[in-house]
Structures are given as structure tokens and as C-alpha cells.
Amino acid sequence: MSIDDVKSLWKWVGSGAFLASMCCFPSVLLAGLGLMSIGAADALSKNMYFGPARWILYGMAAILITFGLIRYFKGQGICDINEVKRQRKRIINTVMIAIFSTIATYLIFNYVILELLGIAVGLPWEEDAFWN
């Protein structure tokens, strides 16, 4: 296992977490750049977060992580069922770490960083913040 393989897996984890956060990120970015009014940005984020887009983004993030894990294990030479059986514990541990890391990264990015940035650019999210 090389450092590049591990870095590649973490890129997939980070990408999955970022993709799952796309319900709120565009609103913060566009409002922060002055390309969208605060009211429109708030409406966009609420429509995406409380609508079907959030679940679609979660599904796409899960597919992205799955694809990244498959590429990672193929790069490790785990390509057939016999090799999977031999390295079962390693595979389970790696998958669990990747899933929990993606979820933790998503929670921190979406509910702390984007929340604080959204409040800083003027979005009315402070009363709904998790710390209130």
C-alpha cells in the first residue's frame, strides 16, 4: 500500500462529502460573491435541502465513495472473490473508515463551516443553527 493510494482514497472521501454538501454550498458561494440576493440564496438552499435534491446528492455521494473504494481495492490487487475472502477484515475496516470519515467530513463542512460562512454573508441561518 503506497501513500498515493491512501491519498487517492481520501480524495474520494473528500469529494463525496463535498458533493453531499452541494445543497447549501451554491447558496453561500453565490451570496458571498454578490451574484445572488440573500433572499434568493436562502430560498435556493431551503428548496435544495428540504426537497428531493438532498437525497439525490446523498445517493450520488454514496456512488462516488463506492467507486473510489472499488478503484482503491483494485489498485491494491484485490480483484477476485478469493482475494476478497483472504483480506476480508482489511476490506471491512477500510470501508468503515471511509464511510465514517465521509460522514464526519460532511457534518463538519455542512453544519459548521458552511453554516458559519452562510451566517457571515447574511443568510438567516443563525436561529436554525445546530448550536442554538
Image (cartoon, rainbow, N blue to C red):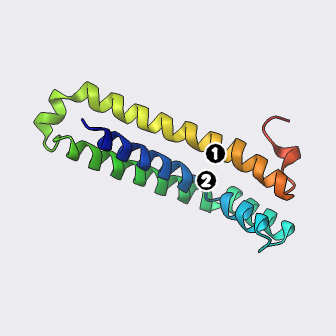
Closer to the N terminus: mark 1 or mark 2?
Answer: 2
Image spot of residue 44 (x, y percent): 74, 66
Quadrant of the snapshot with the N terminus: top left
Q: Position of residue 28 (x, y in %)?
A: 74, 60
Q: Amino acid at mark 1?
A: Phe
**Could you say where residue 114 lies in the image, as x and y percent from the top left?**
71, 50
> Mark 1 or mark 2: which is in front?
1
- In the rendered structure, the answer to whether residue 10 lies left or right of residue 108 reads left
Label 1 sits on a secondary structure element that is helix
In-image side of 4 versus 23 (left or right): left
| Amino acid on which the number 2 mark rests in the picture | Ser
Q: Position of residue 85 (x, y in %)?
A: 17, 30
Q: Quadrant of the C terminus?
A: top right
**Residue at the (62%, 61%) spot, across then down:** 52
Give me the residue at 71% from left, 42% from top: 112
Q: Observer-nearest residue: 128 or 101? A: 101
**Residue at the farthest top position:** 89
Q: Residue at x 28, y 32 (%)?
A: 91
Q: Residue at x 42, y 49 (%)?
A: 12
Name the side, left or right, on which 77 lies relative to 11: left
**Residue that lies at the very extreme toward the front in this rendered image:** 3
| Residue nearest the viewer, comparing 26 with 6 | 6
Element under label 2?
A: loop
Q: CA distance from mark 1 to mark 2?
A: 7 Å
The correct choice, above or below, for 121 with respect to 9 in the image is below
Label number found at residue 109:
1
Q: Which residue is mark 2?
A: 21
